[in-house]
Structure formats: C-alpha cells, structure tokens
Image (cartoon, rainbow, N blue to C red):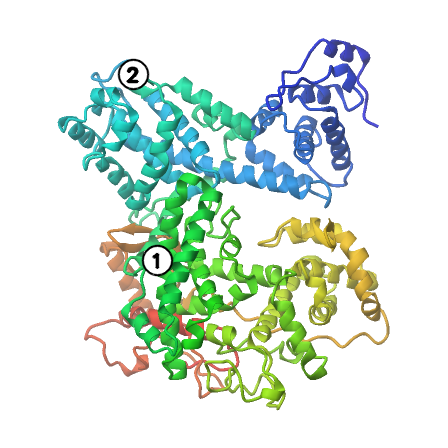
Amino acid sequence: MPPKPPRKGGAAAKGQRASPDRGTGGTSPPAAARLEFGETDFVALCDTLRVSDTVRANAWKTYEKVSSADGTLVGYSEKKKDMWGICIFIAAVDLDEMTFTFTELLKSIGMRVCTCFQLLREMDVNMDTISTKVDSNVSRLNKKYDVLSALYHKFERTCALIYMIQASSQTSAELSLPLVLKTSWITFLLAKGKVLQMEDDLVISFQLLLCVLDYFIKLSPPSMLKEPYKSHVSAMSVNGSTRAPRRGQSRSTRTSKQTDTDTKVIEVLCKEYGCNLDEVKNVYFTSFIPFLNSVGIVTSNGLPEVEDLSKQYEELYLKNKDIDARLFLDNDETLQRNHIECLQLERTPRKNNPDEELNLILPQTPVRAAMNTIQQLMMILNSASDKPSDNLLSYFNNCTVNPKEGILARVENLGNIFKEKFAEAVGQGCAEIGSQRYKLGVRLYYRVMESMLKSEEERLSVHNFSKLLNNNIFHTSLLACAVEVVMATYGRNASQSDGTSTETDLSFPWILNVLDLKAFDFYKVIESFIKAEPSLTREMIKHLERCEHRIMESLAWQSDSSLFDLIKQSKEREGQVDQPEPTCTLNFPLQHNHTAADLYLSPVRSPKKKGSIASLNPTPIIDAQPVLAPQTQKPQKSTSLSLFYKKVYRLAYLRLNTLCLRLLFDHPELEHLIWTLFQHTLQNEYELMKDRHLDQIMMCSMYGICKVKNVDLRFKIIVTAYKELTNTNQETFKRVLIREGQYDSIIVFYNLVFMQKLKTNILQYASNRPPTLSPIPHIPRSPYKFSNSPLRVPAGNNIYISPLKSPYKFSEGMLSPTKMTPRSRILVSIGESFGVSTSEKFQKINQMVGSSDHQLKRSAEVSTAPKPLKRLRFDIEGQDEADGSKHLPGESKFQQKLAEMTSTRTRMQKQKLNDGTDTSATEEK
C-alpha cells in the first residue's frame, strides 16, 4: 500500500489550488481529496503538474510496479522524484490527459531531456510497463529534440560567421546582437511550427532557417555584419533598397519586389552550407513569405517585436505540450546534452602522429551530413533528364506495343497524387517542395530503367521488351523505388550519425501507400535497381536493403498480399503438397541470375501448358547450376516466390543466430532445434505470419524449444535481448495480433495461438524421436554491401586499401573524405591534395612494397573460373598485373597498383553486385 501522508499535510494542501489546466481551462479538486495516492512529495508533484485523480492512481501503480522489479533502475532508487515524474508522464499519455508540457515536467523534477529518455528506456523492463502509445510519443519528442538541438547549434555557429561580436559605434544602442539572435530564433520557431506539420524534417527546417537568416540579415544595419553579408546589404542600400523605405513598405509590397540584389544573401548562404538554391527559394516564396504575411509582425527598432513573436510561439508550445525551444537561447540545463553525447555529435578525427601536418577536417554535424548526402544524389542526377532519353525512346519504339504514352501518363498521374499526399504530410505550403523531390525521383526512374534495359539486352540478345515495358506494376514499383531513394536522402534525421534509417512520417513504407503499391511487388525491383545504379551511395544501398528486410519481415505478410495466393498456388499444383522452397537448397549459396523482368513476368508454370511461359528469357530462367538441385521434369515454380523464400530463410536464420549468441551461448545445441521449428512454421504454418512479424515467430520458437528442453529462458529475458538488436521495434513484442481486431503481448500470442497450433510439433523435440533437423542456411555477405574491412594489397607488406567512408565534404565539385580509415601510422587518402608530407608517405609505402619478398601462394584447388573481388585484384581490362604492359616507365609498384585500382573501380563495383555471394569458386591469385 502506498504510504498515506499525515492529515496536516492535507490540511495545508487543502487551501492550495492548482493552476488552471491550460488545455481545458478547468481546475483540479482540492489536494485533500487526493491523498489516497502516494507520499506527500508525490502529491505535491501531481499538484504542480495539475494532473487528475485517475492519472495519479495510474502513475503510482506504475511506480510500484517498476520499483519492485529486481535489479532495475540501478542508481535511481534514491531519486524517487525523477521516477515519479516519469510515471506521471506515462500515465498522462496513456490516458490522453496531458495537463502539462514536456518542458514543465523536466523543470519540475530537474532532469535533462536526454536523461529522461534514457530513464524511460530503463523503466521499460516488462512488456506492459510502457505502452506502444507512450513509445510513439517519446519517439516523436526525441526526434523533435534532435532536430531542434542540431538546428540551434547550427544557428549559433552560422550567426557567429554573420554578425560582428562587438557592436559598432554606427549601430543603434537599442539594436544589440543578443536581441537580433533572440528575435531570429523565435521567428524561426514560430515559422517552423506554423509551416511544417512534420516537424522532424531536418532538411526543410534548415532551409527555412536560412530563409529566416536571410530576412534578418537584410533588416540589420551593415555595421553589424561581417563580410560578405555586409557588402551585399550595403549594395542593397545603394540600389535604393535601404532599410528605412523597406520598413515603410507593406509586407506584401516588400516581399513581392525581389531584385537580383535581394537574392545575393540567400545565394551566399546556400553556397556556404551546400543547399540547393532553387529548393531554398521555393521554401522562401511558397512557405516563408506566406508565413510573414499571416502572423502580422509588428516592428520595433527595425526588427519584429520579439515579445509579440514569443507570445504567438507560446500558444503553439502549449498546444503541442512538448519542448519549449526558446530555452536554447538561455543554455537551459534541461535541454543540454550529456557531455559524452556532445563529443559524439561534434567529434573531429585526430591525427595519429603529432609530427604530421594538420589537415583540417570539419566535424560531421547532422545538418552538414544531411546536406552532403543530398549533394551526392545531385551529382548523380544533375546530368539526368526528367524525360525519356533518346536511348529509352529507341527501346520504346522497338516494342510491339509502344509504351511511351502510358509511361508518360503514369508519371504525370502519380506525380499529382504524390504532390497532394506530400502536402498533407508535411504542410500545405510545401506542395511544390514535394513536386521538386518527385521530379528528382523521375530522373532516377528513367536513368535506372535505361540501365536495366541495356543489361537485359546484353543478357538476352533481344530488343523487344514490350511485355515488361507495358507492365503497370513493374513501372510503379521502379518509380516508387526511385522516389524512395530521393525521400530517404532528404529524410535524413538529426539522430542519424551513422547513416542508418530513422522513422519519420515520410519513411518507408509511406511511398507504397501513396502509390497504392503492394510491398511484395515492390520487393521484386529492389535488387535489380541497386545493380542497375552503381553510383548509389553506401547509405542508400543500406537503406534499400533495410526496405527489403522490412518487406520480408512483415510487410509482404499482410493479409491482402499477393504472396499468400502464390503460396497456395504453389502448394495446390496438381494436388501436390509442395513447399515454397525446398529445404535441401538452404545450405547452398544464394546464387541466381534473376532480374526484375524475370520476377515480374514469370508466373507459376502450369504442367498442362508446359511450353507457355510469360517470360522474356528464351532460355531457362535459372542458369545451369548443378550444385543447387538435380534436373527434374517437375514444373517450374514461381521465380519470385522461390527467391523470396530463399531470402526470408536466410534473414530469419541470421536474426535467430544473433539472438542465440546472446542468450544461449551455454546451450549451442539448441540453436539448430529452434531453427528447425522456426523454418517448419514458415514453410508449413505460413498462415501464422499473416499480419504478423517474422521476429514474433522467432521468439516464440526460441521460447517453445527452451521450454521442452527444460532450459530456463523467460520471455522477459528474450525481449530484453531482442531490444538490443539492430532495427527492432518494441511494438513487435508488445502488440501482436491474437485474432481479428485483437492485439496483445507476445506471451498471450504464444499461449493462445502459437502453442495451440504447434503443440504437437513442439512436444516432439522432447521425445526420443525428434523431427529431422532443417539444414542451416548458407549466410553470404550481403550482395548490396561493400566490404567494411580493409583489403590487403597483393605482394604488399601490411598494406591495405579501404573504401572511403561517407559522409563527404564537397570542394569545387570533387569528393574528398571527411572521415578516413583505417587508423594507421601512414594514411594516404587518394583525392586529397599532395603535399610534401604526402609525397614522403608514398615513398615509405613504396619501400614497404619493394622490400617485401612475400609472394601470394596459389590455392591447392585452383578453379578454372576465377572468383573476382573476394580480394582486391589489380588488373587493367583483363590483363594480369604481372604483364607489366600499359605502365609508365619509372612508376613504382604501388603507383602502378593505384592506377590499376582507379581504372577498374566502377567495373569492380558492378562485378561485386552481380556476384558477391559465390564461395564455391576459388579466386584467381
């Protein structure tokens, strides 16, 4: 029972009334009526936050549950007030009774925002402690804080480059730098809140910040500004656009008369921070100017009245009940990051050797990383067209039915839908921004389509692609993939320090819903898309791979998916009890020559119509691979289904293996049993996957086998380890479909659904005659990734070459690395300027190569077919490096190798994507 405070506390509290609820305008009942719950300090905290009796009761119940858990919240047991505050927050969100803002909560318990998020994660010890509703709310707050924090630090650094720190004698005493900064920041916060519905969009938010800075630079006297802004503002005065007349004009007159001089400031800002000028102008005219015209800004001393702006922002802040971002101006303790996080946010690589020259490498702040990622995409698409090229038109003309008109109509129609949905998600003033991003996607769509057709032409020696190019689902999928690449590039979040994906309102699978595309159909194009566009950045390849994984995990298993029809067709062929993919192939490499054309145009072949198959390929779809399966007369299955199941099995085992290494290292023999049950369920009880997640079946399989084998492994331990895996969501184990419309935790799902369906099978593992074990899938390196490990140079003595790691810094159109690996005593980056020190490094490396007598040994089992790219090979257009031809006299061995590597880099990428998984062939040394 919670301790009851003494009556005198109640009497004292009786006369105190909580301040009115800002959301409803109501008042809370006297404190004396609420003394049934908690200690006196708890009651006082509830009074401060103006919470209802229901919230108090639920908060205290949560506190008792968490505080009684063994071994949880180490270090917080003495900080009851912190835990009370978090419990009140949890209860208020669950009950939709938020009578306080998130900042008020932090202030009332004296806690930093990052500490609060960390404590919430630690309190989530049981599956029912924190609901998915609270998870979602916290995730939204976390993303908003990350964006605001990143933007404020960028704002501070940018203003330091714009404004003079010391006030000039020509500057009005009433116009101080702190006032300008305060007014600018609050104007930005108000604009962001009114313009953007999706406030975690880092890119549009930063573009809007540049518009605000441009606005205030023009309002500032030249004496306050540094160059080049001072010159541009002075030029505006010379050209007649002085500050006094501008203040005398109405806003509509002032903003409608944009001269070439007026755009100089925004051009400088865009160039300085790597922003696309057209995009920022779009934000300026379609969003920022309408905002200025709508808020009724009152000026004072040439600047908008800060108190009026602050009052309007206050209304937004209280309505959203989240973070008061004005406190960044005061360096408020609640909004400060922890020291370690600050170091990680703005870390700069250090020199390994103090004698080396200092190469200034700019820290990769979230904003800079986002801008650089966009610039990489722009470099790919700058030369592309948003119309079909002559080569594409030639392919169209070769078709039996020319697809040109249908393709153009589809692109236009889907563009209108995309623009409308983008505006609904981001903000009505952002429709043109959505249109710009869609056009970039269309450029990539045509570019990849042409590359795909060229590859198909080389592969099949045919020119008529009428069936493929008139396939609506193929085109919609290809366009969706191209637009998704653009959206993911722009959707980089402030918390993405490693380039991984972070959920936003526009995150995948948003594009599928917009274009009314099924996930299983979208899946078919991903691998071919990546192979057809070798210029995709590492981050984008990882993103598309993650999209593919999400489809295999859950999206393809939704009840309206065509996947289930394909499985049923496969099992019902000629009355056979068939398998989507035979288990005998699991331990063979995932090797195939299928392209998007095969996957979209090859249905299940009927045995009665053996000669008819809707495929482009005049030869069998699967090339001769005797190691995979014996040749039989059995009718061929759906290519797309077979390949899908192969990939699902490998993903499933990889995740299971990772979890077993964490939980069952003392019982390694159980992994194979768990995998057998897991694989059996996916193959024979696939209906259990409908509207569920692959990991739910995995965790239930693990729990079931451990149960019958008398290994003590509770679900609580399983989900705790599962949360630590990459790309996991707590909703996976907190909200599982039980029956139509009913959801509960994974424990309930196991007891009511999984165990009931598989009880007989599970019990067999406890008998003397357990089921035959399923083969362990062959786990190749991902065909989409490039090696993270440095590659050793043949004939080199401890010399390795490592791919440059993103993000990049753009300097005069050239890529140069801002992060360099491996960390070594001699580090050379190809592409950097060659100084004296760099020359000395080359000489040292040449000496290392020249002094090495080490020769690579040939494998005892040399295959006639070399396996390229398992290790780095240095050859020019097929000639072995030992030939020595095409080398300039006087070149060192290392220089020769570098030249060869550079000339073959693109071909190597393509080869690696096409191969990447074959381990049966021995490489050519």
**Are dots 1 and 2 in contact, CB under 8 Å?**
no
- Compared to residue 443, the image places residue 94 above or below, namely above
- Compared to residue 219, the image places residue 127 above or below, namely below
> Residue 230: x, y in percent?
20, 29
Foreground pick, 897 / 241: 241
> Residue 907: x, y in percent?
35, 73
> Residue 487: x, y in percent?
43, 52
Q: For the point 41% across and 22% down, which residue is it?
A: 309
Residue bearing the label numbered 2: 301
> Residue 654: x, y in percent?
61, 65
Q: Quadrant location of the C terminus?
A: bottom left
Residue 291 disc label:
none
Foreground pick, 116 / 738: 738
Foreground pick, 188 / 566: 566
Q: Secondary structure at mark 2?
A: loop
User: Is disc 2 surrounded by few (<14), some (14 to 19) or many (20+) residues within 10 Å?
Assistant: few
- Compared to residue 917, the image places residue 364 above or below, namely above
Q: Secondary structure at mark 1?
A: loop
Residue found at the very far left of the displayed protein? 238
Residue bearing the label numbered 1: 827
Residue 150, image quadrant: top left
Horizontal arrangement in the rendering, residue 562 relative to residue 253 (left or right): right
- Compared to residue 771, the image places residue 490 above or below, namely above
